[in-house]
Image (spheres, grey):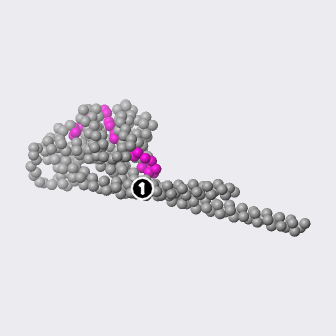
Amino acid sequence: MPNLRDIRNRISTVNNTQQITKAMKMVAAAKLRKAQERMVKTRPYASKIQDVVGRLVGNSSSTSNPIMRSPEEVKTVLLIVVGSDRGLCGGFNNNLFKEVEKTIESKLAEYRNAGTLSLVTVGKKAGAYFKKRKYKVIESHPGFFDNLEYDATSAIMSKATQQFMNGEFDEVYLAFNEFKSVIAQNRKVDKVLPIDPSQISTEAGDASKEAIDYIFEPDSEAILEKLLPLHLNIQLWKAVLESNASEQGARMSAMDSATENAKDLERELKLKYNQARQSAITTEISEIVSGAQALGGN
């Protein structure tokens, strides 16, 4: 039978853990509200930028923009992975990283084997995971979510765009967790460069297909040249905000489960404590009765 003091110590430890996980859940819930507000405010802007770009692509007779020009042969690939800086968020990171590795094995294995697959990681967990597995991580951004600003994400995507235009990379992919609900995320690995004109026109929706004759000044090609880099920057910014909201939702869900598990464990330990205490009392009573009978016999 376990020692009563040991059981009491375990109950106290479990109770303290329960208080910590409950507090972490409340903190994650507060951060989730703020993250959702930023994400929801960004979505209409990103959608409208995509509509405008889709309309311009549909009205433009030229696809000579270097951002939309596909290479004759793909030799080098860049993959931007958006993870998190902190753990204790369930399978948020591992599920995404497994999806990334699955995509690499199915689509990009030849480039990894040839050493021409490079990674840019956002968040401490992403950098640690892929460096440990000997991937070619050329740039990492730990602590990125401590001060989440548009300029930081814009710098990452602008650099990747410039490297693509300079011919350093032939394709650029973006991997992140898209926010679906507090308890669910969509893991996405999308190709962002080169931009496919037909793809962006389709994703832009009906707004780009309206038969309205707009007058562009100076011309659609010049406007498109300015908007395409902005569209790419907004894509990464939206992905980072989606990932941040998904992380807080995953952490809130994980801490809620941990709190409930701690409550269940505490109930089991209290039951064991009561059983051990009852057994000890019964033993003491038996010893007293036995002693009394022995004295009476004398």
Q: Residue furthest right?
A: 298
Q: Within 10 angstroms of label 1, few (less than 14), some, or many (20 or more) residues?
A: some
- Residue, x 33% and y 47% (percent of image)? 148
- The image quadrant of residue 78 is top left
Q: Amino acid at mark 1?
A: Val
Highlighted range, magenta:
67-92
Indicate whether residue 186 is drawn in magenta: no
The image position of residue 166, as x and y in percent, is 24, 32
Q: In screen coordinates, is 257 left or right of 37?
A: right
Q: Residue furthest top?
A: 114
- Residue 183 visible: no
- Whether residue 179 is situated above or below residue 160 in the rendered picture: below
The image position of residue 102, as x and y in percent, is 40, 43
The residue tagged 1 is 27
Q: Quadrant of the N terminus?
A: bottom right
- Residue, x 42% and y 49% (percent of image)? 92
- The image quadrant of residue 265 is bottom right
The image position of residue 138, as x and y in percent, is 36, 34
- The image quadrant of residue 109 is top left
- Secondary structure beneath disc 1? helix
Nearest the viewer among 238 and 221 is 238
Q: Main secondary structure of the magenta part?
A: loop
The image position of residue 285, as x and y in percent, is 76, 66
- Residue, x 17% and y 41% (percent of image)? 225
Q: In screen coordinates, is 147 left or right of 264?
A: left
Nearest the viewer among 199 and 54 is 54
Q: Quadrant of the C terminus?
A: bottom right
Q: Residue furthest bottom?
A: 296
